[in-house]
Image (cartoon, rainbow, N blue to C red):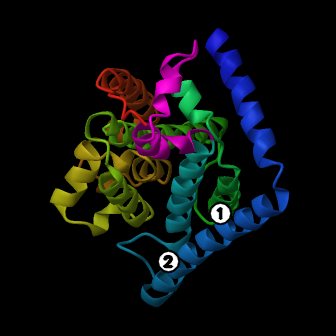
Amino acid sequence: MHTLRIYRALMGAAVRTELQYRTNLIMQTIGGITLQGIGFAFIWVVVGRFGAINGWSLGEIAFLYGMRLTSHALWTVPFAQVFQVEWVVRTAEFDRYLVRPVSPFVQLVCRRITLTTFGDFAGGVVLLASAATLVHINWSPLAVCYLVLAVVGGALVEVSVNMVVSTLAFRFTTISAVRLLVDNIFNTFGNYPMTILPAATRFGLTFVLPLAFVAYFPATAILHRTGQLSVPSWLAWSAPAVGAALFVCAYKFWMWQTKHYSSSGH
């Protein structure tokens, strides 16, 4: 509870700092919404040209795209500073985190908050809500609850992967190439049904880099498409729990890797 209170205080200070530059915040938020709109417009054109993508209609792909975009924005708002571990290590800023009576991880994520990703979040929510009217789903309270858990679980999967990759900086200092590769994989393949990929690629994006658990698996569960999966349907339904488990493991990995931190001496 003490750590939570400190987190809330530091995050509040970070939010107030960002709000000092409101024009910049508004412009970047609009830019985020526009960028995501262009990305979906490309998919719209492709589906309009071919009618469907491997049996997935425009509404179903929009639903998948909206889930992934909302999950992505949900984790980047509070945890975007995970991307800055390499910088924090190389400049020896992490030294200060170790001598303060607060969790180094809390200090890192509260270093700054990226409010501009609210554009992605707003775009994802609008797209998801719109797509929900285009697909045939019985929106019972249980279905709505699962959708919320799935979006949160997807956010936890993505932040967990990025935590694991970023904390390698404690050993290797420079990991930007690996981080960019992982980010590109998520952005490239996360918005499409994985049935368009070869079996070996689907296996890798499920059990090596768990991209499938972000949006594809929960979307197939909600859309009643689990019959086309090459894994048991219960694995798709368990996506929110997988996200929570991965986050716990990623945090433990973070704690383990910090033991290998060596100050750069700057």
Q: Position of residue 72 (x, y in %)?
A: 53, 51
Residue at 48 percent of width and 19 percent of height? 98
Q: Between 55 and 181, which is closer to the camera in this rendering?
A: 181
Q: Position of residue 124 (x, y in %)?
A: 63, 58
Q: Is residue 121 left or right of residue 226?
A: right
Which of the numbered marks, if any, corresponds to residue 43?
2
Residue at 52 percent of width and 24 percent of height? 97
Q: Is residue 115 left or right of residue 209?
A: right
Residue 112 lies, with reference to residue 102, above or below; the image says below
Residue 46 lies, with reference to residue 215, above or below; the image says below
Q: Quadrant of the C terminus?
A: top left
Q: Position of residue 19 (x, y in %)?
A: 82, 48
Sequence-first disc among 1 and 2: 2
Q: Which residues are magenta?
A: 78-104
Q: Quadrant of the N terminus?
A: top right
**Residue 84 shows in the view:** yes
Q: Residue furthest front?
A: 266
Residue under label 1, please give it. Answer: 127
**Residue 237 shows in the view:** no
